């Protein structure tokens, strides 16, 4: 592979939990959503998977239909999503995940994820879907694949009066570090290859 | 099962192609989308499947953020969907479909379906997803499960100068009639049970 600096990188195994990124892959200015969209687009063009971000749910209240031009939505409101943001298919398997970033450095606040999203993820697991979260510590520039079943443990513990966040070390241990790469910025399907195939 | 008229209905096999509906199941006033949403809701509550309609894609241009109240979208436009309207998971399988109605009685116009939707469906089939269209002849009050692979044949024929619609008789032959029912109005998963399990 040709990287912009012309050097070969150390292709560490994807489960390597001690991240070290080359400066060229720095994520400054790119949001997690942009990285995932880029990756999904790369998967789609190469025929590897069909995974899309769902449109933002909007409650449309008032639409104007001008003559000879497109309808204009004049009043609408953001609705809370009742499912996760991303889903699709990979190698015959249903893929479903949520992506979240935090600026915290020591833990991931569970408040970032909503009750009905967790409920949705539980239902997907019951149907044998591949379900997970992609969590990013944006200040640390580190991104993790975090299996839904692990997330449920922390979520249910919180609901029983436990801590309201997942410690950084726990995410390192129970999750899988996703190195930031050039061609496919967040290659989460490689983690799925390891875990499910 | 208790139907509103207190009578037992003849539960015909779902692949029966000669539809006969009791008046109570008449669909007058219910759109295909409403029927499918009701069915998906029933599947979800009973834990049978997790299938949702994707939100309408909207291009947001201008948002107002009033103090102490919710953000108001002041200008937005409808975008053309790049995928199908519905997807989800059932018994471990990825489910993906488009739903369309026509007021025609003799054929289904292919203009109702967009090029990029067919492209999406082809990609889903390559990944071994369960992909199909639900087609309704609203004047006839008849709804059909139509496998994507059959749809592609008609689509590709059209692109090679063939006819621009699928004849009603062909849909009866190549599709599966979905009877309108009370508890689950459009029980398309029963067709999938027959075809894939």
Image (cartoon, coloured by chain):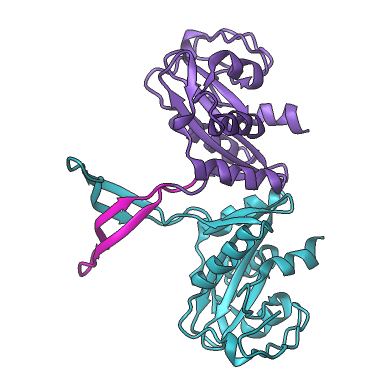
Chain colours: A cyan, B purple
The span picked out in magenta is B53-80
In the visual, does B28 lie left or right of B70? right
The image quarter containing residue A26 is bottom right
| Furthest residue toward left | A67
Residue B180, how many percent across, how many down? Answer: 54, 19
The verdict on residue A93 being magenta is no
Residue B33: in sight, yes or no? yes
Image quarter of the C terminus of chain A? bottom right
In the visual, does B112 lie left or right of A68? right
Image quarter of the N terminus of chain A? bottom right
The verdict on residue B72 being magenta is yes
**Residue at figure coordinates x 52%, y 54% from the top left:** A83
Residue A84: in sight, yes or no? no
**Residue at figure coordinates x 63%, y 50% from the top left:** A123
- Viewer-closest of B105 and B110: B110
The image quarter containing residue A110 is bottom right
Against A96, residue B146 (above or below) is above
| Furthest residue toward front | B161
- Viewer-closest of B170 and B142: B170
Residue A106, how many percent across, how many down? Answer: 57, 87
């Amino acid at each position: 592979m040709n990287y912009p600096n012309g050097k070969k990188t150390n292709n560490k195994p994807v489960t390597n939990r001690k991240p070290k990124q080359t400066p060229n892959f720095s994520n400054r200015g790119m949001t997690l959503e942009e990285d995932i969209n880029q990756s999904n687009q790369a998967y789609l063009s190469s025929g590897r998977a069909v995974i899309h971000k769902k449109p933002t749910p909007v409650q449309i209240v008032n639409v104007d239909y001008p003559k000879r031009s497109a309808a204009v939505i004049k009043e609408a409101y953001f609705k809370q999503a009742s499912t996760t943001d991303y889903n699709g298919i990979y190698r015959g398997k249903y893929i479903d995940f949520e992506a979240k970033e935090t600026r915290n450095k020591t833990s991931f606040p569970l408040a970032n994820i909503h009750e009905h999203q967790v409920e949705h993820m539980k239902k997907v697991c019951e149907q044998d879907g591949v379900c997970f979260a992609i969590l990013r510590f944006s200040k640390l520039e580190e991104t993790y694949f975090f299996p839904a079943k692990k997330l449920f443990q922390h979520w249910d513990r919180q609901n029983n009066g436990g801590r309201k966040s997942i410690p950084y070390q726990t995410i390192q241990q129970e999750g899988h570090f996703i190195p930031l790469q050039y061609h496919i910025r967040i290659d989460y399907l490689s983690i799925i290859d390891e875990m499910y195939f």
